[in-house]
Image (cartoon, helix red, strand yellow):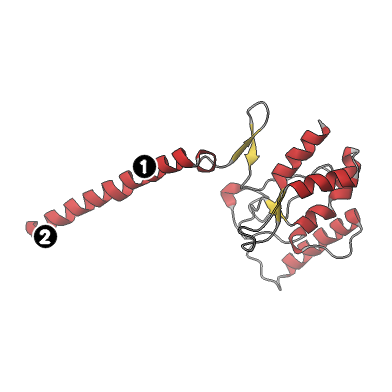
Amino acid sequence: MLAHLRPAVVMTALFTLVLGLAYPLAITGFAQGLFPAQANGSLVRGADGAVQGSSLIGQPFAEAGYLHPRPSAAGDGYDAAASSGSNLGPLNPDLAARIKTDADAIRADTGASVLPADAVTASGSGLDPDISPAYARLQAARIATARGLTVEEVQSVIDRHTETPLLGFIGQPRVNVLMTNRALDALAG
């Protein structure tokens, strides 16, 4: 029995050291060396060095002078510790009521009759940092009025922060809410 037990214990210890310690340390070192910003969470810092957020994690913006993100089903909204969708099916009356309430509020705010889907639907994680260019443009007039800017100035900031699909065809055009709101703050200040 010891003849069979010894190799099993040795292999368990070896693989624990290699796969549980050496490999994670090597990958962490590789990531820190080649991609330090991404390896540390793509944190966005203000002029004073304070962390304002991450370009990869959505956060709520409710003030009239900012782009508003898409709805979040993560906890009480944009709670990274509770990342998830709502798990409500398309026929669920609670989901239909929430979408109707949100759509009515956006229509009253913008006067639009047709809304982009991301204006009223949450992402799968509930933490999506991006919105569609159509939803961003829909908010331009409200932002311009609140900031005392022209719609063209706000639209120019949105256009500069519109990212294209990867390689031209993977994904959709998108606007990062945090980065665009930072640019709007810089324009005003």
Q: Which residue is mark 1?
A: 25
Residue at 39% in and 45% down: 27
Q: Is residue 111 above or below residue 38?
A: below
86 vs 146, nearest the viewer:
146
* Front: mark 1 or 2: 1
Residue 28, x across and y down, in percent: 41, 42
Residue at 36% in and 42% down: 25
Which quarter shows the C terminus?
top right
Q: Is residue 50 above or below residue 152?
A: above
Q: What kind of residue is marked 1?
A: Leu
Q: Is residue 62 above or below residue 108?
A: above
In the displayed image of the protein, which residue is found farthest to the front?
Answer: 167
17 vs 101, nearest the viewer:
17
Q: Is residue 80 above or below residue 125?
A: above
User: Quick one: SS at disc 2?
Assistant: helix
Q: Which residue is mark 2?
A: 4
Residue 57, x across and y down, in percent: 62, 47
Q: What kind of residue is marked 2?
A: His
Mark 1 vs mark 2: which is more N-terminal? Answer: 2
Measure the C-alpha gap from mark 1 to mark 2.
Answer: 31 Å
Q: Which of the 4 quarters of the picture holds residue 180?
A: top right
How crowded pointer 1 is (Cα within 10 Å; few <14, some 14-19, many 20+) is rated as few
Which quarter shows the N terminus?
bottom left
Are the residues at dot 1 and dot 2 in contact (C-beta closer than 8 Å)?
A: no
Residue 37, x across and y down, in percent: 54, 39
